[in-house]
Image (cartoon, rainbow, N blue to C red):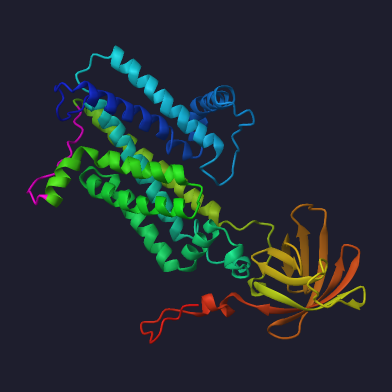
């Protein structure tokens, strides 16, 4: 297979060769094998590469860097673990070594063809991930509507990341807008004619995302920063032309040379590979969306019970216990939402449980997350739209409780809608 590339026979300077080769090595080693290993089933194929690499990186961290307790944690939700930083340093150093070796061994006049292959890979890498993050925003996969536990939490008790997630999740329209811009930028990157505008959009979008990650301590700093850098890498061959267009008002034409194949089988293989990749990645995205929005089969829960409940009356073994600030046993609030229940005492942190509701027998079945053998059955009786009388045994005690419900729409954050006209700012 051969490709027609610009400046194919031009001799590059040594410094340009060195910078280009290092950029190619670093970008390729950082990206590979993603996003291909995100496709279900295909990840097994690439494990032949990823597993040995993981072993080498762990050895490098423990032996060379002296991080004796280093390990790769399977799932943390963080992309900024110690292992990630060690891996990044390892990739950086290996890229330097490879650059030196290639420059000493290779007799190539330039590395334009290598650059072009990595450039195409970067397009699909950034494009597919932007499409993924854009689509999952459409389905509440990243920023979910504000949960009742968050509504009951004070600003001072929230983390910077929690504050950002609450801000983004509160407005479905704004989240959809952000996802739409990411999606459009990603799609534009997949097509040669729209690559430049897609890369510029991706740079702007990811620069804002990276800034939020840094400013709100979101542990995706490395990944978002690299998406910014890769966006610059994609548009780098055209920076000079863009500068002359925007700052010198020169007329010019930006043209990306297409791949030209000699044989028909090469053209067919290229098209089939491209379509296959897009189809498989699309299936992976769909499966991820289904997984994110899937409801566990064993959850039987009535949404009418969602809300925060103030425990107005707490009777334990026949004794009524007042809400004293020094009491660590009396229930103060009960937060219930989507099969989860949090029991908050007057003093101390809340305790999390799973809950099932049976509206026929009027019963809550509460199961401890820490110990699944601990199951409590509480009967309830609705006294009014907002009041529940709850009775049952909890541990070795008999409880009788009066809960007063406050639903999500009763909070000021959710009551305040959109207003075209505001005589005064409603800022609380």
* Magenta span includes 25: no
What x and y, as percent, mark residue 68? 63, 28
Picture quadrant where residue 313 is located: bottom right
Q: Is residue 288 left or right of residue 183?
A: right
The residue shown at (23%, 50%) is 197
Task: List x then y, in percent, for residue 164.
Answer: 49, 60
Q: How many marks?
A: 0
Quadrant assignment, res 118: top left
Nearest the eye: 89 or 144: 89
| Magenta highlight on residue 255 | yes
Quadrant of the rendered structure where residue 215 is? bottom left
Residue reaching furthest to the left: 251
- The residue at the point 50 percent across, 35 percent down is 85
Residue 332 x, y percent position in the rendering: 75, 72
Report whether residue 111 is seen: no
Residue 390 appears in the rendering: yes
Q: Please indicate whether residue 279 sits to the left or right of residue 322 in the image.
A: left
Q: Closer to the camera, 317 or 262? A: 317
- Given residues 131 and 232, the one toward you in this image is 232
Name the residue: 71% across, 64% down.
342
Establish if 207 lies above or below 174.
above
What is the chief secondary structure element of the magenta stretch? loop
How far across and how far down the image is residue 100, in percent?
Answer: 34, 18
Q: Compared to 338, does 7 lie above or below?
A: above
What span is colored magenta in the figure?
248-261
Q: Is residue 387 above or below residue 39?
A: below
């Amino acid at each position: 297979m051969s490709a027609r590339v610009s400046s194919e026979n031009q001799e590059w300077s040594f410094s340009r060769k060195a910078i280009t080769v290092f950029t190619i090595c670093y970008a390729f080693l950082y990206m590979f094998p993603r996003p291909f290993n995100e496709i279900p089933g295909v990840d097994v194929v690439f494990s032949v590469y990823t597993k040995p690499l993981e072993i080498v990186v762990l050895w490098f961290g423990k032996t060379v860097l002296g991080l004796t307790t280093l390990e790769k944690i399977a799932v943390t939700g963080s992309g900024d673990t110690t292992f990630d930083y060690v891996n990044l340093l390892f990739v950086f150093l290996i890229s330097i070594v490879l650059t030196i070796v290639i420059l000493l061994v290779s007799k190539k006049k330039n590395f334009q063809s290598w650059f072009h292959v990595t450039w195409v890979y970067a397009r699909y890498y950034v494009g597919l991930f932007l499409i993924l993050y854009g689509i999952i925003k459409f389905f509440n996969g990243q920023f979910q509507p504000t949960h009742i536990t968050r509504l009951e939490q004070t600003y001072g008790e929230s983390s910077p990341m929690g504050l950002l997630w609450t801000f983004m999740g509160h407005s479905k329209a704004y989240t959809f807008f952000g996802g739409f811009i990411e999606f459009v930028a990603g799609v534009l990157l997949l097509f040669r004619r729209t690559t430049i505008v897609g890369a510029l959009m991706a740079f702007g979008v990811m620069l804002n995302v990276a800034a939020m990650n840094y400013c709100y301590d979101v542990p995706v700093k490395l990944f978002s920063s690299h998406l910014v850098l890769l966006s610059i890498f994609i548009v780098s061959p055209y920076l000079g032309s863009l500068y002359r267009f925007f700052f010198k008002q020169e007329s010019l034409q930006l043209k990306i040379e297409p791949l030209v194949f000699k044989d028909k089988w090469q053209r067919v293989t290229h098209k089939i590979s491209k379509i296959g990749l897009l189809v498989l990645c699309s299936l992976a995205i769909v499966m991820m969306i289904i997984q994110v929005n899937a409801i566990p089969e064993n959850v039987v829960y009535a949404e009418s019970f969602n809300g925060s409940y103030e425990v107005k009356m707490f009777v334990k073994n026949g004794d009524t216990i007042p809400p004293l600030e020094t009491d660590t046993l009396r229930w103060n609030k009960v937060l219930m939402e989507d099969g989860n229940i949090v029991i908050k005492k007057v003093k101390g942190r809340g305790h999390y449980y799973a809950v099932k509701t049976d509206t026929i027998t009027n019963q809550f079945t509460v199961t401890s997350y820490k110990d699944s053998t601990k199951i409590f059955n509480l009967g309830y009786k609705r006294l009014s739209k907002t009041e529940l009388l709850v009775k049952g045994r909890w541990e070795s005690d008999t409880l009788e409780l009066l809960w007063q419900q406050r639903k999500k729409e009763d909070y000021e954050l959710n009551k305040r809608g959109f207003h075209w006209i505001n005589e005064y700012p409603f800022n609380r």
